[in-house]
Image (cartoon, rainbow, N blue to C red):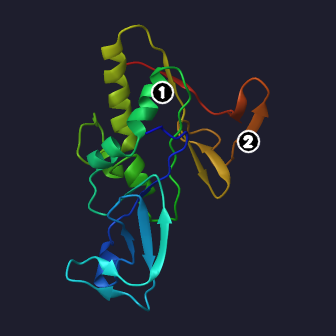
């Protein structure tokens, strides 16, 4: 099967404690094909014996979909990011971004546990690690197995309320950076910190 240039992957988060305390139901379910999600109509929703929602609703198709019990490792291994790592090591640009409403699980999926990552002495290797720590570890391992010489640079940004924020610097907090176009570079973020990395 040919690889698409753009993959759209959906991860459904489980109900949080507040939602469970209100006895809310999961009205978005992943199809058996793991490529569709169905948004159920709460008016026609009924509980089945398997705990999976059934009822009328609207189905949407994506590159792949992951239900709530999906582990961080399972998501990492199956979402297509390994293809991006290989492409990046071959010299191509690669981008991963998370999109969704507040509280939908973007930060956990991308970074893992905030408390763990921000703790002193964090070195990775936890089952709760998100895509970024797992990707960094895989890039280093793949580069070493390939041999040769690699130079790594990294930047990290967040777009929130239409403001582009640099996540690697503490300067200019509150001031959004500008996205610009250059004939040779293409799109770039003016003033975004780029840090050289080493193992």
Q: Which residue is at 33% across, 29% downward?
A: 138
Q: Which dot marks residue 87? A: 1
At 53% from the left edge and 25% from the top edge, which residue is drawn? 195
Residue 53 sits in quarter:
bottom left
Q: Label 2 to label 1, Cα distance in Å?
A: 27 Å
Q: From what the image shows, is residue 54 above or below residue 142? A: below
Between 62 and 143, the one nearer to me in the picture: 62
Name the residue carrying label 2: 178
Question: Which image quadrant is residue 137 in?
Answer: top left
Nearest the viewer among 102 and 68 is 68
Q: Say left or right for 191 vs 146.
A: right
For the point 53% across and 36% down, which residue is it?
A: 168
Element type at marker 2? strand
Callout 1 crowding tier (Cα within 10 Å): few <14, some 14–19, many ≥20 = few
Give the x, y percent position of residue 86. 42, 27
**Residue drawn where x is 34% and y is 83% of the image:** 24
Locate residue 97, reporting x and y percent: 52, 46
Residue 152, percent from left and from top: 48, 20
Quadrant of the rendering where the C terminus is positioned: top left
Q: Nearer the viewer, residue 148 or 50?
A: 50
């Amino acid at each position: 099967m040919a690889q698409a240039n753009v993959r759209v992957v959906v991860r459904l988060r489980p109900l949080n404690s507040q939602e469970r305390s209100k006895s809310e139901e999961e009205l978005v379910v992943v199809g058996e094909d793991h490529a569709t999600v169905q948004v159920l109509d709460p008016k026609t929703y009924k509980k089945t014996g398997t705990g999976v929602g059934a009822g009328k609703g609207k189905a949407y198709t994506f590159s792949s979909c992951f239900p709530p019990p999906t582990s961080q490792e399972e998501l990492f291994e199956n979402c297509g990011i390994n293809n991006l790592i290989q492409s990046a090591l071959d010299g191509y640009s690669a981008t991963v971004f998370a999109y969704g409403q507040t509280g939908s699980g973007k930060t956990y999926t991308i970074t893992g546990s905030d408390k763990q990552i921000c703790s002193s002495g964090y070195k990775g290797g936890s089952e709760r690690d998100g895509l970024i720590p797992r990707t960094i570890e895989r890039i280093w391992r793949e580069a070493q197995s390939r041999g040769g010489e690699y130079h790594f640079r990294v930047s990290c940004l967040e777009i929130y309320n239409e403001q582009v924020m640099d996540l690697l610097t503490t300067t200019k907090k509150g001031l959004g950076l500008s996205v610009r176009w250059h004939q040779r570079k293409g799109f770039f973020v003016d003033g975004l910190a780029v840090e050289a990395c080493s193992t």
